[in-house]
Amino acid sequence: MRGRTLVCTALMLALWGCRSPAGSPPQQAAPSLLEVSLPDLSRADEAVQVQARERHAALLEKIKAGVKGPELGAAYGELGMLLQAAEHPEAAEPCYRNAQTLMPADPRWPYYLGRLYQTTGRAPQSEAAFARVLELQPDDVPTLVQLGRMYLDRGNPGAAEPLFARARAASPKSVAALAGLGQTALANRQYERAVEYLEAGLAADPRALSLHSPLANAYRALGNLQKAESHLKQWRNTDVPLPDPRKEALDALLESSLSYELRGVRALNGQDWKGAAALFRKGIALSPPDSAMRRSLHHKLGTALWMLGDDRGAVAEFETVARLAPAEGVDESSAKAHYSLGIVLASSGRAAPAIEHLTAALRYQPSYAEAHLALADLLRGSRRFAEALPHYESAVRINPRSAQGRIGYAITLVRLGRDVEARDWLADAIRLQPDQPDLAHALARVLAAAPDDRARDGKRALEIAQQLSATQKTGAVAETLAMALAEVGQYQDAVTVQRGALDAARRAGQPGAAARVTANLRLYERDRPCRMPWRDDELQWPSGSG
């Protein structure tokens, strides 16, 4: 064991062979406690090392002074909390078990043990620990939800459902409880109930964007494809909020850069941009200058400043991360900083430097799907079609559900004169993702207006466009319908539809779109079809189906 490791000798306080005086009751043996030791803390922040040594020293003092019972248990438990927060679960476990032995009625210690076992992949022990918490505190919402999620993940919705129901009874507006009930109903194929619970969860907290995915699945199972598609577009991989005072106490325990980062992220999730920025700054002050943690904190500070409207301050933070980035190798924070700079520059029309930053983002994280997609969009918008194509391929390979990536790839194929490939690519994409109407919209464009007559099929294009226009009253869909009408020779109808699209563009104050619509209108008025599925002004960043 390294020199920095301090070992506390095991406490074996059982009294062997002691006899009670005649007539007196036998004495109870003191509980056996586990050996506790500090791990190697050399990689931890100096402040964390000091905290750990101070708590360990306090524990040793209590042992030396003969302290017993709950006071000693609390000392063990508090040391365990600090070690768990510092990501040393092996060292924290015996502390918690000793605390639980000495304080069997306190729900904190089985709860922290449950989380510890959960994070170290010991599901049976975690379930047993959480069950013990519920014996002591039957209406504890965080424990009910955690245990319910574990049963649900294990494919046992029957055991999960009553736990989520109890959590909801204890906290009727708990998004986590409603989400659990919705996902349990979905697993049981009770789709209407799933919709009821999940919609209630979103109503309670619209920021719980991850609920849109199970909602989309429920609506699709009910045959409501329009609502399914709407929810799928809103999905983001976010955490479902679960207020948990014990976990918050754990996260706030360390005076470390990691602790401030965790607390800052929680403030970001709660849209407390100012509070998040203050916490990230404190974390920066505690982190080594060239560490990955410092880069991560600078990037998150930049995000908070951007949300506060301090664009200049945000860009300065992102540039700091880029300046501190290692010369080579994978580095997530550096990739995110370059990506953020690329998006900021692209949004202000500065494509060339944006491309440089997005390229750098991929150098630090080659599997960054969003960076591949953004770079492909910019290259395509800059008419660098051959360079854009492999980045669309990478975006789709990394995220197969990226409809935007599939559409961008098809548009680029058309611009490269590979119309038949674009048609077949989109037809295959629709087979893979039938719930994505934007893919059908893009295919209708190719079928109606591809320059290569081998790729066109006006009748099929018209069928798709009419189906889309029945549910999507947008200018883009109207333009596609007019293209299809012109392709089958119904020029007067195409003129009527295109004029409606022109009026809509003018009312919306979109002069660029109005000019594009007018150009196609003049073709239809002369009984000529369109031979350009997407015009140049539709190729600017970001991509879309038109």
Image (cartoon, helix red, strand yellow):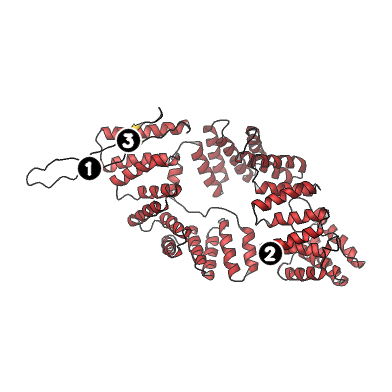
Label 3: how many Cα within 10 Å (few below 14, some 14–19, many 20+): many
Amino acid type for the residue under numbered disc 3: Leu
Residue tagged 1: 30
Amino acid type for the residue under numbered disc 2: Arg
Circle 1 sits in a helix, a strand or a loop, which is it? loop
Q: Does residue 357 sit above or below 433 in this rendering?
A: above
Residue tagged 2: 431
Pick the quarter of the image with the N terminus. top left
User: Taking 258 as reference, is 505 left or right?
Assistant: right
For the residues labelled 1 and 2, the Cα–Cα distance comes to: 69 Å
Amino acid type for the residue under numbered disc 1: Ala
Of mark 3 and mark 2, the one earlier in the sequence is 3
Quadrant housing residue 357:
top right
User: Taking 311 as reference, is 63 left or right?
Assistant: left
User: Taking 101 as reference, is 83 left or right?
Assistant: right
Q: Nearer the viewer, residue 93 or 497?
A: 93
Residue tagged 3: 59
Mark identifier at residue 527: none
Q: Nearer the viewer, residue 287 or 282?
A: 287
For the residues labelled 3 and 2, the Cα–Cα distance comes to: 64 Å
Quadrant housing residue 91:
top left
For the residues labelled 1 and 3, the Cα–Cα distance comes to: 18 Å
Circle 3 sits in a helix, a strand or a loop, which is it? helix
